[in-house]
Image (tube, grey):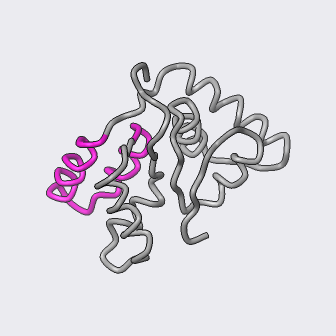
Amino acid sequence: MSGLRAGGILPDTSVWVRYFRPKGDEDLKQQVAQALATEEVFTCWVVKAELLVGARDDQAFELLWSRLGALREVELVPEIWTEAARLGRRLRHQGFTVPLADLVVAQCAIAAGLELWHADAHFEHVRRVVPLRVRGFCL
């Protein structure tokens, strides 16, 4: 993560799925397209892996691999995993169970100073206990 400056966005898998869906939320699609044209858009391996697992065939996998490879990446260093575990434990003690993938994505956004774009209610729980900047779509 060294060299990353504060600013930019990290779209969660939930946003990318809606963006790539042929019949989807047009407002979300416009917002993502505008961000890709005008802002620094980041990804991380959790998001990339979740998207690639869902590719319908080899051709779609390669196209997606190429598109995601053009984005800057937040490196998954050990501290992100440790803080994700701490966050998950803290949330669980408050009565919320958040999937590990979401905890790691949230920690990537926090560590890199990025705004997390999502369409997943789990991140609304997360932002109540840590300084996670979010923009929610379609909740």
- Most extreme residue toward the bottom is 23
- Work out whether 23 lies above or below 59: below
- The location of residue 96, given as percent across then percent down, is 77, 50
- Most extreme residue toward the front is 38
- The location of residue 136, given as percent across then percent down, is 58, 61
> Is residue 128 rendered magenta in the image?
no
> Is residue 59 rendered magenta in the image?
yes
Which quadrant, please, contains the N terminus? top left
* Quadrant assignment, res 113: top right
Q: Is residue 22 left or right of residue 126?
A: left
Residue at point 45%, 60% (across, down): 15
Please state which of residues 30 and 49 is positioned toward the viewer in this rendering. Answer: 30
- Most extreme residue toward the right is 94
Residue at point 37%, 69% (across, down): 29
Q: Is residue 49 left or right of residue 85?
A: left
Please state which of residues 131 and 80 is positioned toward the viewer in this rendering. Answer: 131
* Quadrant assignment, res 119: bottom right
Which quadrant, please, contains the C terminus? bottom right
Bounds of the magenta segment: 43-71
Residue at point 53%, 48% (across, down): 116
Q: Is residue 99 left or right of residue 69?
A: right
Q: What main secondary structure does the magenta stretch of the protein show?
A: helix
- The location of residue 106, given as percent across then percent down, is 58, 41
Please state which of residues 80 and 42 is positioned toward the viewer in this rendering. Answer: 42
- Work out whether 25 lies above or below 39: below
- Work out whether 24 lies above or below 89: below
- The location of residue 16, given as percent across then percent down, is 39, 59
Q: Please state the total of marks drawn on the protein image.
A: 0
